[in-house]
C-alpha cells in the first residue's frame, strides 16, 4: 500500500462520508475489508480486492481489516504485520500510521473488535472466510449482501443513498480510471493493425492498465464475437472483415472503476453494412446522453435508445412497422437485449453486491418484459451520479434462432434483409457519463467514437 | 474453453494417468474443479482457475465440474449451460463433447454425483463454496488439503507419486509456459530502457503473457526492492543505479506453470559491486545445475548453493572464516534466507496445497535451522521432475538489522565492508530445470543469464 498517495482532502472526504452516514443511521456500523481468496494453493492468492463499502469509508485497500463507525467516529481494527512478514513482504505501514492517514479516532488490533460488536449493522462481504468471521463476531447469521435484513438492510439503504452521488474525491478517482482506460483503448485500436488474435489486442490494452499501476475493474471482453455478450475467450484469430469489440476498464488502486466499450473494424475500415449499424448505435448513444439531466428517469433513457434503434432498423429495412409499436412489443430487444447501462463507482456495476437495492428506486422491481428485464438501473437521475451509456446491436444466435422468438417476431423482422448484415455480429459503444446540475459530462469523451474518427486512428 | 486444442495424445495421456492412479489406489476418487470466487460482487468474479488435481486427470479447465475415477475409468459430472447462459456467454461445448475429448467412460449432470459418492476419496479444493459441497456430498468433514486424513491422505500420496515426475504431455505444456515466460522477460528487459516505474516494466512483461492467451502463474514481482522477497508493489520509480528484479511466469490455458527470475541493471550496466554479487549468484546457480541428476538429494543442491555463496562472500570480504563452518552456522542465510527452489508443474510451487506431502520425502520434516527451514523440497531428484534453481543475495533489513542476528553473526560479517555493497539490495536468478536420465535440461535456457549477455540486451 502506498500511503504517500493520500492527502488531507481524502481525510476530509472520509470524515464527511461517515458524518453523512451518522445522520442516517444511529446504530454502530462495522465494515470488513475481506481477504484475497486462495487460487491453487494458500500461498498463491488472487490479487486482493477490498470490499467496496469498506473502501468507501476507509479509503485504503487494507487486507484483513475492519472499521467501526459510530456517530461519525472511525475506529480502525488491523493487526500490524509480524516480524516474519517483514522478511517476505517488506516493512508495512503500521496501524497507527494508517489510522492517522484515514483520520481515524482510534486504532486497535483485530482481536479487540470482538468486544465492540454489540448491535452493529454490517454488509456481508464476498470473501467467505471473512464472511464466516462476520457471522461469528456479530453472533448472528448475517444475510448475504443481496438480501440484507433488519439493521443490515437499513445500513445498506443508507450506504446506497450516499454512494449514488459521487463526491469530489470519488470523481477524481473515476476520472483517473477513465483516463487510463481511454489510453488502453487507444493502444488496443493501434495494436489491432498488427495483431493476429484477440489475445494480442487484449495484451496491448491491459499493458496500459498495468503500467499505470492499476488493475482491470472486470474481466476484459476483447472479441470478434461481440454477439456473445460476456465473452471471455480470446483465442480467435482476427480476420479482415471482422469487427472487434473491446469492453475494458481500469480500476484505481483505491478501487474506483471505469467501463468503456469500443467496436472497430480489424481492417481499419467499416464495411457499408457495419457502418450503417455502427452509426445507428452511435445515434442511440448520443441521443441518450443529450437527454440526460437530473430528474430524468434512466428507464426512459433506456426506452429512448430502444426507440432510436427500432426507428433506425426500420429505416435499414431490418424491422417492419411503427417504431413505437415495435418497442412496445420488444422487437428492439431482438438486437439490443440488454439494458442501456448501469451505475458506476467503486464497482463497475456499482453496489450490485446489494442486488437491486442500489439500482432500483424503492418500490420498483425488475420488469418481466424481454426488453426491460435486463435494465440494471431504474431511478431518476441525480447530479453526481455516474452511469454508463452503452447501446448495442447484436445478432445473438440464441435469440434469433429461437423458434419462440422466430414465431413471435415472424412478421416484424425482414429476415432476408437481415441476411445482408451478417458481417455485423456485435457492436457496442459505451461511455461513462456524469450527471451534472445542468446536464451531463462524458468522462470518457477523449476516446473517439465516431466511425470516421476511429478509422483515422488506424 | 477451446476444445480444438485437445489431441489424441492428450486423451491417451489422461487415460495413462488414471490407470497409474488405479494401480495405487483402489477406492473410488472424486475430484472437483471448483468455481471462481466472487470479487466485489457475484457477477464480477476472479478469473477461474480449476483445481490442479482435477486438471491433472481431467485435462480441461471445466468450471464447476467433478470427475469420478475408479479402476482407471473416468466419469464426468457437469451441467450443460442453460439457454439463458448462451445469450450471455455464447454456445458452450456440450457435456458429451467434452467427455469425448477427455476420453471419459460416462458423463452425467452434476446432480447425479450425489448417488455416486460412497467410499470416495478426495482432495479438498481451495474454493470454499465447492469445499462445502465436497463435505456435504461425501457426508463427512473433508480435512483441508494440507492435512488430509484417512483415504484422502492415501489419495494425496498417490497423486504426489504420479505428479512428481512429468509425462510428455505435461512437459510439452511446461515448455510452452517457459517459452512465453522467456519472451515476457526479454520484453521486460527491453522495456526497462524507456520505463519510468516498476509498473511499466510489469506491463510490458504481462502483455506478452496475455497476448499468448495465457495467465500469470502467480503475482508478478517486478521491483527495485528485490530485498523484499514477495514484493507485490509496483509504484517505485526506476533510478539509474537500481537493480530491477523480475520474477514473472506464465501459466498455460491447461494450467501448467513456468517460474523465471532475472535481475538486471536499470541503466543497462551493472556497477562493479552489483557485478561481483551477480556473478557469485550465477556461479551458485550454475554449480547447482551442473551437479543435478537422478538420485542426488535436492537438499544437498541447496547446501551446495549455500557453500558457493559463503565462499564467494568470504572472497569478497563480506564474510570471514571457513566457508564450511559458515554454512554450518547458517551465515549464508543472512543473505540467502530462502530455499534453492521448489517443484514446478501445474502449480508454481507444485502440489503445495498438500503442505509438505509433495515437497518432503516420507519421514522427513522441515528443519528448524535458519538456513534450511525455508527449503520447500527435500527429496532425491528423479528423472521427469521439474524444479526451479533460484539462488539469491539480499540485504533484508529485517534480518541484517535484527539485534539477535547482529549479535550471533557479529564476528563473521565484515559490516563495514558490506556497506560498500549497499547498491545490491536484492539479486535472484531463477531457471526451470528438468531432471533427465543423464543429468538436466534447463527449460528456460533461451533467456540469457550471464551479466554481459544481459547488458547486451539493452
Ligand atoms: Mn458496462
Ligand atoms: Mn520460484
Image (cartoon, coloured by chain):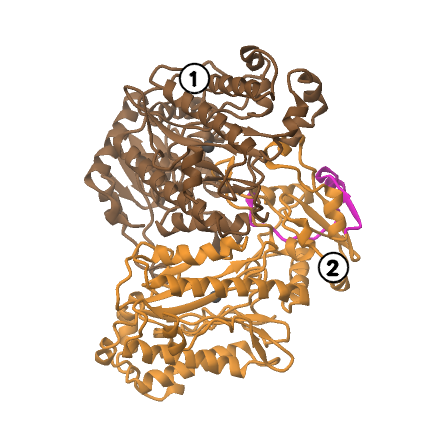
Chain colours: A orange, B brown
**SS at circle 2:** helix
> In the picture, which quadrant includes the C terminus of chain B?
top left
Q: Nearest the camera: A321 or B421?
A: B421
Observer able to see residue B267 = yes
Q: Residue A108 magenta-drawn?
A: yes
Q: Nearest the camera: B89 or B245?
A: B245
Can marks 2 and 1 be said to lie on one chain? no
The residue that appears at 39% across and 64% down in the rendered structure is A190
Q: Position of residue B357 (x, y in %)?
A: 45, 23
Most extreme residue toward the bottom is A322
Relative to A48, B47 lies left or right:
left
Q: Which range is magenta?
A: A104-128
Q: Looking at the rendering, which quadrant does residue A265 occupy?
A: bottom left
Residue A38 in the image: above or below residue B436: below
Q: Position of residue A315 (x, y in %)?
A: 32, 87
Please state which of the two labelled residues, at mark 2 or mark 1, is closer to the viewer.
1
Chain bearing tag 2 is: A
Q: Residue A190 magenta-drawn?
A: no
Residue A326 in the image: above or below residue A61: below
Q: CA distance from mark 2 to mark 1?
A: 55 Å
Q: Looking at the rendering, which quadrant does residue B310 occupy?
A: top right
* Residue labelled with disc 2: A18
Relative to B51, A346 lies left or right:
right
**SS at circle 1:** loop
Q: Position of residue A48 (x, y in %)?
A: 56, 46
* Residue labelled with disc 1: B361
Relative to A246, A364 lies left or right:
right
Q: Nearest the camera: A277 or B458?
A: B458
Q: Position of residue A157 (x, y in %)?
A: 65, 63
The residue that appears at 30% across and 83% down in the rendered structure is A319
Residue A437 in the image: above or below residue B18: below
Most extreme residue toward the front is B272
Amino acid at each position: 500500500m502506498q500511503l504517500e498517495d493520500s492527502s488531507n482532502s481524502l481525510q476530509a472526504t472520509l470524515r464527511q462520508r461517515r458524518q453523512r452516514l451518522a445522520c442516517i443511521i444511529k446504530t454502530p456500523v462495522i465494515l470488513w475489508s475481506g481477504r484475497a481468496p486462495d487460487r491453487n494453493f494458500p500461498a498463491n492468492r488472487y490479487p486482493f480486492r477490498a470490499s467496496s463499502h469498506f473502501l468507501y469509508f476507509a479509503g485504503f485497500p487494507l487486507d484483513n481489516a475492519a472499521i467501526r463507525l459510530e456517530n461519525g467516529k472511525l475506529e480502525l481494527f488491523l493487526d500490524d504485520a509480524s516480524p516474519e512478514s517483514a522478511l517476505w513482504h517488506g516493512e508495512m505501514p503500521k496501524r497507527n500510521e494508517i489510522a492517522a492517514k484515514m483520520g481515524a479516532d482510534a486504532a486497535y488490533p483485530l482481536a479487540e473488535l470482538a468486544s465492540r460488536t454489540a448491535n452493529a449493522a454490517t454488509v456481508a462481504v464476498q470473501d467467505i472466510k471473512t464472511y464466516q468471521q462476520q457471522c461469528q463476531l456479530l453472533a448472528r447469521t448475517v444475510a448475504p449482501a443481496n438480501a440484507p435484513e433488519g439493521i443490515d438492510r437499513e445500513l445498506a439503504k443508507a450506504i446506497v443513498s450516499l454512494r449514488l452521488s459521487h463526491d469530489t474525491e470519488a470523481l477524481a478517482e473515476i476520472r483517473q480510471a477513465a483516463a487510463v482506460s481511454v489510453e488502453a483503448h487507444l493502444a488496443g485500436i493501434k495494436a489491432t493493425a498488427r495483431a493476429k488474435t484477440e489475445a494480442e489486442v487484449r495484451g496491448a490494452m491491459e499493458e496500459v492498465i498495468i503500467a499505470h499501476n492499476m488493475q482491470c475493474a472486470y474481466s476484459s471482453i476483447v472479441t470478434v464475437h461481440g454477439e456473445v455478450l460476456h465473452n471471455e475467450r480470446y483465442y480467435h484469430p482476427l480476420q479482415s472483415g471482422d469487427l472487434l469489440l473491446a469492453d475494458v476498464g481500469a480500476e484505481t488502486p483505491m478501487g474506483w472503476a471505469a467501463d468503456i466499450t469500443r467496436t472497430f473494424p480489424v481492417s481499419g475500415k467499416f464495411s457499408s453494412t457495419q457502418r450503417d449499424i455502427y452509426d445507428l448505435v452511435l445515434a442511440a448513444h448520443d441521443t441518450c446522453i443529450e437527454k440526460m439531466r437530473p430528474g430524468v428517469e434512466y428507464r426512459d433513457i433506456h426506452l429512448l435508445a430502444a426507440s432510436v434503434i427500432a426507428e433506425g432498423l426500420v429505416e435499414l429495412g431490418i424491422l417492419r412497422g411503427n417504431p413505437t409499436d415495435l418497442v412496445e412489443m420488444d422487437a428492439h430487444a431482438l438486437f439490443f437485449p440488454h439494458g442501456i447501462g448501469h451505475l458506476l463507482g467503486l464497482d463497475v456495476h456499482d453496489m450490485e453486491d446489494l442486488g437491486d437495492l442500489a439500482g432500483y428506486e424503492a418500490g420498483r422491481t425488475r420488469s418481466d418484459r424481454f426488453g426491460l428485464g435486463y435494465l440494471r438501473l431504474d431511478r431518476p437521475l441525480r447530479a453526481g451520479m455516474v452511469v454508463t451509456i452503452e447501446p448495442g446491436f447484436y445478432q445473438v444466435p440464441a435469440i434469433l434462432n429461437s423458434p419462440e422468438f422466430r414465431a413471435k417476431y415472424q412478421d416484424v423482422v425482414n429476415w432476408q434483409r437481415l441476411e445482408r448484415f451478417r458481417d455485423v455480429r456485435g457492436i457496442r459503444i459505451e461511455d461513462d457519463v456524469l450527471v451534472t446540475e445542468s446536464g451531463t459530462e462524458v468522462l470518457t469523451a477523449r476516446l473517439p467514437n465516431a466511425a470516421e474518427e476511429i478509422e483515422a486512428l488506424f
